[in-house]
Amino acid sequence: MSNAIRWRVVAMLAVVALMLFALDKSTDRTSRLSAGKQVPSRPSLNQIDVVIDTLFNRYQIDARGAKSWSVFARDKRFIRKERRVYVPPQFISLDFNHDLSRQLSDFNARVVATERTKESTVAMHIVSDGMVVETITFVLKRDLE
């Protein structure tokens, strides 16, 4: 290929890349603007709390012994609620996870769990619209038998 053709191809590729970049930025801006006008479909934390408290009763977990706190961003915006719950060794977290997932599916939410064997903890993260809205950390405590 001659140098002139090579430069023309490079110039055309640069123009196409610039156009794709501009198109991506404009669609991102319009999607953010339209997302701000939509009503959020996220379930209320009260609905999630009712489901969790019902399951705590079913699994005979003392909710009064649970420590709860809210996590906020630097601008004091609420991010999520966290709970730390002590459970006896016979507690089966997989069953709780399954029941919680089934009941939260009515609210278009799901549960993602993480187990840390060395620390004897299972953290269940409730995800709604791609965001974690609540985390429950179950801590195995041997003296609760």
Image (cartoon, grey):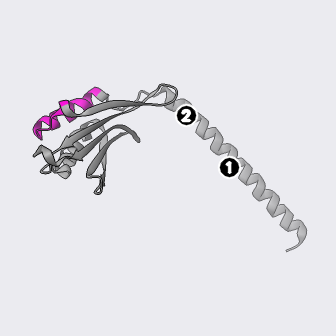
Dominant secondary structure of the residues highlighted in magenta in the image = helix
Residue at coordinates 49% horizontally, 26% vertically from top-left? 37
Q: Amino acid at mark 1?
A: Leu
Q: Is residue 61 magenta?
A: yes
The image shows residue 97, relative to residue 48, as above or below, that is below
Residue at coordinates 79% horizontally, 57% vertically from top-left? 12
Q: Report x, y in % for residue 40.
A: 40, 29
The image shows residue 119, relative to residue 10, as above or below, that is above
Numbered tag placed on residue 43 in the rendering: none
Q: Is residue 16 magenta?
A: no
Rendered-image quadrant of the N terminus = bottom right
Q: Report x, y in % for residue 93.
A: 20, 49
Numbered tag placed on residue 20 in the rendering: 1
Residue at coordinates 25% horizontally, 30% vertically from top-left? 49
- What is the number of callouts on the image? 2
Numbered tag placed on residue 32 in the rendering: 2
**Mark 1 or mark 2: which is in front?**
2
- In this view, the residue in front, 67 or 39, is 67
Task: Tell me if 79 is positioned left or right of 108 in this view.
Answer: right
Helix, strand or loop at disc 2?
helix
- In this view, the residue in front, 73 or 14, is 73
- In this view, the residue in front, 117 or 26, is 117
Can you tell which quarter of the image residue 102 is in? top left
Identify the magenta region.
46-64
Task: Tell me if 82 is positioned left or right of 26 in this view.
Answer: left
Q: Amino acid at mark 2?
A: Arg
Helix, strand or loop at disc 1?
helix
